[in-house]
Amino acid sequence: MAIKLPAGFEDMLPADAGFYQEFVALAQRVFATYGYEPVITPQVELTDLFVRGIGEATDVVSKEMFTAISGENLATLLAGGTVKAKSRLTLRPEGTAGVVRAVVEHDLVPQGAGPVKLMYAGPMFRAERPQKGRLRQFNQIGIECLGAEAPSVDAEGIVMLMRFFRQVGIPQESMVLLLNSMGCDDCRTPYREAVRDFVRRHADRMCPQCLERAETNPLRAFDCKNEGCRAVMADAPRITDWLCEPCRGHHDAVRSYLAAAGVDYAEDPTLVRGLDYYTRTVFEVQALDTNSAQNAIGGGGRYDRLAEEVGGRPTPGFGFALGFERCRIALEAAGVSVERPTSCDVFVATIEDAQRAAAFALVQRLRDAGVHADMNHQERSLKGQMKLANKLAARRVVVLGPDELAQGAAVVRDMGSHAERTVELDRMVEVLAAEVRGAEAPAPEA
């Protein structure tokens, strides 16, 4: 029996892989204009990083992490022993904790220094029940800004994300930006108690999971998908009524900056996100056309205590992450094509097998000149080679034959117009490379 992929994982075939590379490259270009530089952290971190950073009571830590155990440590566990903390490793379920760990470990924000702006891209892993828009391995792009607590940082990040979504092709009318504040310890602690008391008073109408959450992380009751719980929580206390003056001022400033930038948003006092490290600003961008419960395509917020949680000095932070797979679904739902057809600038065909060495040499020279060139590597007639050129979406085909080679020239066929012309072989690379560069050059501005 053929071995297949485990549930919750996907192969990224050439068209999707090419689109993913372009997607990441676009993010790098957009985010770089805001000062963000790339960072790459390991896909495996110490388990304690996520327990301390994300929160032991969160679903991510309590239910969804993939923990890696080496053969030696597995044998120790099976024998009834214990594994040291430095040997407990976990595939990263999200990117923020690892980036903050790297910032702290390498002291990227020295005392009194300006903020550091970092972006990352790569796979994340969660042991969730697979469904559309929810994979066990998924790809995220994210940014983290550490060292500045001004509300302008929050607004700048949100504006940047919305502009990226528009540039990638998601229509503005197909998205909604939800905004809330989680407050700080001074105002969130009494608010958590108020929500806990509210859930307890309505215990007869709440699901068992929400009753359990009420004791460990009561704000997560706002995330429950059970319709009965959602109806109850619609009347729960709102964090915006509990914000202290500094938090209220921060939230008002973020809203003012967004309004000045022309970014529309909707206030959602039930938005709490799923991770414990958030403080003050939280936001989420949802796709409106996907007809899926997994409609969040990006989100994040401020986390001013996370650096301390992982052993660093107090360092305010803000960040967000967006999901590639969910953005792809949102684009398809909005009717935006994400196909990336294979394309070839020049295909070199031969009339006889005797010209294959000359074709091989020409293809190499074209590639050295930066031209995407290919040729036939099988026993195919000229007709078969033309079919292959069509399959590769070749824009031009150079046909090498004995008579043409004897004359030091070859026929070049435009596959769009079917027009043919003869080009000297000595000038072939120069002519075709110039045409390819001309086709790639941006049109002059009017």
Image (cartoon, rainbow, N blue to C red):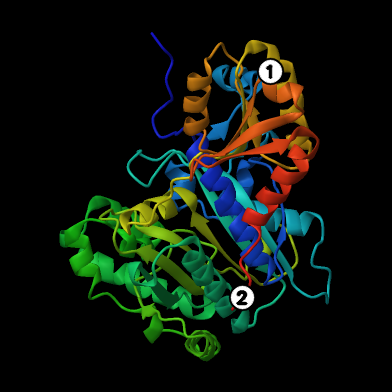
**Going 60% across and 27% down the picture, which residue do you hit?**
69
Could one spot residue 342 in this view of the protein? yes
322, 201: nearer the viewer: 322
Quarter residue 351 falls in: top right
Circle 1 residues within 10 Å: few <14, some 14–19, many ≥20? some
Mark 1 and mark 2: span between their CA atoms?
Answer: 46 Å
Residue 233 is left or right of residue 127, and the answer is left
Could one spot residue 52 in this view of the protein? no
Q: Quadrant of the C terminus?
A: bottom right
Circle 2 residues within 10 Å: few <14, some 14–19, many ≥20? few
Residue behind mark 1 = 402
Residue 330 is left or right of residue 121, and the answer is left
Q: Is residue 434 above or below residue 71?
A: below
Give the image location of residue 192, x and y in percent.
40, 71
Q: Assign a secondary structure to mark 1.
A: helix
Give the image location of residue 270, x and y in percent.
34, 72
Mark 1 vs mark 2: give the one in front.
1
224, 175: nearer the viewer: 175
- The numbered dot on residue 151 is none
Residue 282 is left or right of residue 107, and the answer is left
Amino acid type of the residue that numbered disc 2 sits on in the rendered structure = Glu
**Going 68% across and 20% down the picture, which residue do you hit?**
403
Q: Quadrant of the N terminus?
A: top left
Give the image location of residue 12, x and y in percent.
49, 36
Amino acid type of the residue that numbered disc 1 sits on in the rendered structure = Pro
Q: Is residue 31 above or below residue 419?
A: below
263, 363: nearer the viewer: 363
Outermost residue, top side? 1
Q: Assign a secondary structure to mark 2.
A: loop
Residue behind mark 2 = 445
Give the image location of residue 296, x and y in percent.
39, 59
**What is the total number of numbered labels drawn onto the structure image?**
2
